[in-house]
């Protein structure tokens, strides 16, 4: 599963873990997150996340 990183605070959204504190079950892909989901630490919107690519860098 692909991980996404917040461009503001560097929080990783890991779909294998989800975001249980905010009702997001493990196995929920980034694309399946509700449009109003925000970064747990800094409250940035989904649009400020970038997808991790295999070489360890990121793309938005």
Image (cartoon, rainbow, N blue to C red):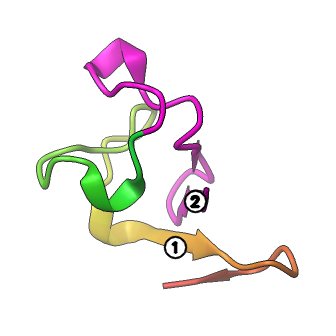
Among the 4 quarters of the image, the one containing residue 51:
bottom right
Q: Residue 37, percent across and down?
A: 22, 44
Which segment is the magenta one? 1-27
Q: Which residue is mark 2?
A: 5
- In this orientation, does residue 43 appear? yes
Q: Secondary structure at mark 1?
A: strand
Q: Residue 15: where, in percent of width, then height? A: 52, 43
42 up-or-down from 4: above or below: above
**Residue 18 percent across, percent down from the top left:** 46, 32
Mark 2: give few (<14), some (14-19) or many (20+) Cα within 10 Å.
many
- As drawn, the residue found furthest toward the right would be 55
Outermost residue toward the top?
Answer: 21
Q: Is residue 23 magenta?
A: yes
**Residue 45, can we see it?**
no
The majority secondary structure of the magenta stretch comes to loop
Q: Which residue is mark 1?
A: 50
Q: Nearer the viewer, residue 19 or 44?
A: 19
Q: Secondary structure at mark 2?
A: strand
| Left or right, residue 22 beside residue 28 | left
Please name the residue shown 42% across and 27% down the image: 19
Which badge, 2 or 1, comes first in the chain's sequence? 2
């Amino acid at each position: 599963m692909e991980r996404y990183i917040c461009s503001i605070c560097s929080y990783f959204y890991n779909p294998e873990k989800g975001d249980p504190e905010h009702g997001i079950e493990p196995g929920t892909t980034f694309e399946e997150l509700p449009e109003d989901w925000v970064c747990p630490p800094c409250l940035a919107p989904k649009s400020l996340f970038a997808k991790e690519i295999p070489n360890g860098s990121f793309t938005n």
